[in-house]
Image (cartoon, helix red, strand yellow):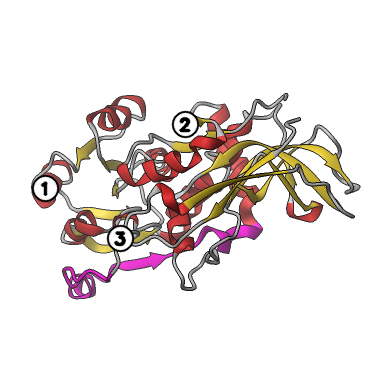
């Protein structure tokens, strides 16, 4: 064990794009667990775009942080001390814990994971929240039909890349938007989707869609918002289905941008637009994990991870999300699993 505990706290509310001054690293004694509590050493820490919303001083689907609060994230960790009867030293668990080397938490807030069934990191990615978001967001919120054209923004991210593959498994033509040639190659060559558009190198998204989706768009899975979504909405077919998963293009906006009015486009098409939060499907999480695990095991689903080494580099990993630096799931590796 380390002799001290490093932990990030929320130092200030950002205006616009966050900087490193939002994060303050403090160092204190390793805490001791109380009654029915567990001391967990962090192995992997997840950073996700939704955390930007928790930095605002207003209510959202995720509770905002107060200045001075420890930053929280989904974590895979190892139990190093336990006063909880269902967890023992050496067990691997997941839960919402601090950006820290160690966290003390109630045992009821932790869920065991089995490193023999899948790599530990996958429980924060393809078998965790991002995988479940893709599974329910596509299959329940915007159910595809064989032959549909499915367009995915943020297609090379943890959620988007899984959506692309599930759509392909359902017999759809899949088009993805991503922000680099490396990501385009990943989507087209590694994942085998039908076409990908580099939005940073494309002047007119509508013209690009005319080329790769000449029959229009039946399903749109939106991780991004902004000009990409404005363009896709002009290509929706009758009875199109749209799932709104994220709007990262707007997370750093200080005011609400005025863009094209989309409702007049939706009305004659009888399109369905659905915003969703994956936690709404919590009673069915096991179903998604089992199905995703089967697809991974038989090779129908693959995944990519971008892993940043060291707790001290967690702010860089988070800020890199807004520059599109990651392919697949962005993780921070804090320590080796067996340490």
Region of the chain picked out in magenta, as a range: 255-283
Give the residue pinned by disc 2. 305
Q: Mark 3 or mark 2: which is in front?
A: 3
Give the residue pinned by disc 1. 210
Which label number is shown at residue 105?
none
Q: CA distance from mark 1 to mark 2?
A: 32 Å
Q: Residues within 10 Å of mark 2 (few under 14, many from 20)?
A: some
Circle 1 SS class: helix
Q: Quadrant of the N terminus?
A: top right
Marks 3,1: beta carbons within 8 A = no
| Residue plotted at (51% across, 67% down) | 61
Give residue 94's position: percent from left, percent from top.
Answer: 68, 44
Q: Mark 3 or mark 1: which is in front?
A: 3
Which is more toward the observer, 71 or 234? 71
Q: Say which quarter of the image contains residue 199.
A: top left
Q: CA distance from mark 3 to mark 1?
A: 26 Å
Which is more toward the observer, 19 or 158? 19
Q: Earlier in the sequence, mark 1 or mark 2?
A: 1
Give residue 165's position: percent from left, percent from top.
Answer: 40, 38
Q: CA distance from mark 3 to mark 2?
A: 24 Å
Q: Is residue 317 rendered to the left or right of residue 270?
A: right
Circle 2 SS class: strand
């Amino acid at each position: 064990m380390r002799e001290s505990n490093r932990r990030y706290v929320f130092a200030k509310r950002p205006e616009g794009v966050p900087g490193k001054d939002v994060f303050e690293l403090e160092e204190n004694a390793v805490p001791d667990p109380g009654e029915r509590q567990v001391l967990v050493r962090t192995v992997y820490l997840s950073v996700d775009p939704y955390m930007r919303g928790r930095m605002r001083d207003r209510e959202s689907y995720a509770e905002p942080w107060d200045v001075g609060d420890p930053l929280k994230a989904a974590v895979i960790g190892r139990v190093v001390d336990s006063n909880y009867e269902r967890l023992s030293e050496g067990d691997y668990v997941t839960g919402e814990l601090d950006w820290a080397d160690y966290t003390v938490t109630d045992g009821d807030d932790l869920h065991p994971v089995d490193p023999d069934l899948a790599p530990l990191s996958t429980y924060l990615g393809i078998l965790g929240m991002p995988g479940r978001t893709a599974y329910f967001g596509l299959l329940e919120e915007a159910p595809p039909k064989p032959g549909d054209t499915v367009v995915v923004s943020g297609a090379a991210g943890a959620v988007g890349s899984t959506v692309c593959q599930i759509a392909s498994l359902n017999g759809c033509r899949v088009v993805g938007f991503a922000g680099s040639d490396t990501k385009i190659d990943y989507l087209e060559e590694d994942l085998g989707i039908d076409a990908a558009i580099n939005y940073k190198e494309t002047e007119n998204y509508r013209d690009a869609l005319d080329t790769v989706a000449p029959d229009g768009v039946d399903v749109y899975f939106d991780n991004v918002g902004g000009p990409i979504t404005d363009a896709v909405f002009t290509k929706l077919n009758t009875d199109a289905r749209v799932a709104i998963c994220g709007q990262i293009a707007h997370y750093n906006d200080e005011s609400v941008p005025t863009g094209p009015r989309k409702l007049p486009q939706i009305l004659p098409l009888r399109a369905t637009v659905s915003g969703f939060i994956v936690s709404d499907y919590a009673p069915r999480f096991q179903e998604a994990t089992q199905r995703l695990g089967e697809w991974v095991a038989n090779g129908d689903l693959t995944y990519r991870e971008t892993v940043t080494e060291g707790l001290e580099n967690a702010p860089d990993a988070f800020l890199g999300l807004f520059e599109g630096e990651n392919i697949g799931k962005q993780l921070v590796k804090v320590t080796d699993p067996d340490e």
